[in-house]
Image (cartoon, helix red, strand yellow):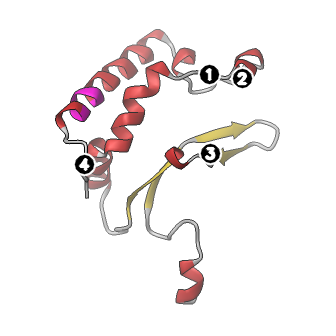
Amino acid sequence: MIEQEADLLLLQPGSTYLFATRFNEKENWYTLNPHPNASKLITSDATLDIATLESLVAQDPKVLSLQSAYPNEVLLPADIANNRTLNSFHSLPEDKKAEALERAREAKVMLDQKPPHAVVP
């Protein structure tokens, strides 16, 4: 690939991202949510190991915000009616809900400790 073509890519090879996705049963694939808050570049450093990536994710303000909000998600009535609530907080078994609530509480504590302008590398 020439350098000019690489600049046109929506996703950069070697980068790590977080995406909000939705499963399409008919096509048997996941689709990306186009909302600006539905994706996050975690790092462009392709040399990082899993432990370092997990550490970056665990400290990222957007990830923490999503974790904090998860128990309060609002499902679309059409999704509820058509049983398309896979991976929603409300679809979790009680033990997984408890784990998600604990992660949400921890995320909220971490967010409250960070100044609003905090930037995580």
Determine whether label 4 and label 1 are within 8 Å by CB.
no
Q: Tell me if residue 57 is in the magenta stretch.
A: no
Task: Point out the tag, 3 or 1, that comes first from the N-terminus.
Answer: 3
Residue at the spot of label 3: 33
Is the C-beta separation of discs 2 and 3 under 8 Å? no
CA separation, marks 2 and 4? 36 Å
Q: Amino acid at mark 3?
A: Asn
Is the residue under label 3 in contact with that under label 4 (CB below 8 Å)? no
* Side of 34 relative to 14 (left or right): right
Within 10 angstroms of label 1, few (less than 14), some, or many (20 or more) residues? few
Residue beneath the point at 43% across and 15% down: 97
Position of the C terminus by quadrant: bottom left
In x, y percent, where is residue 120? 25, 53
| Sequence-first disc among 4 and 1 | 1
Which residue type carries mark 4?
His
Tag shown at residue 79: 2
Q: Are marks 2 and 1 in contact (CB under 8 Å)?
A: yes
Up-down relation of residue 49 to residue 29 (above or below): below
Cα distance in 3D space between marks 4 and 3: 26 Å
Residue 72 in picture, x, y percent from top left: 47, 19
1 shown above or below 94: below
Residue at mark 2 to residue at mark 1: CA–CA distance: 7 Å
* Residue linked to disc 4: 117
Which of the two discs, 2 and 4, labels the residue nearer the N terminus? 2
Query: Residue beneath label 1, please?
Result: 75
The region drawn magenta spans 107-111
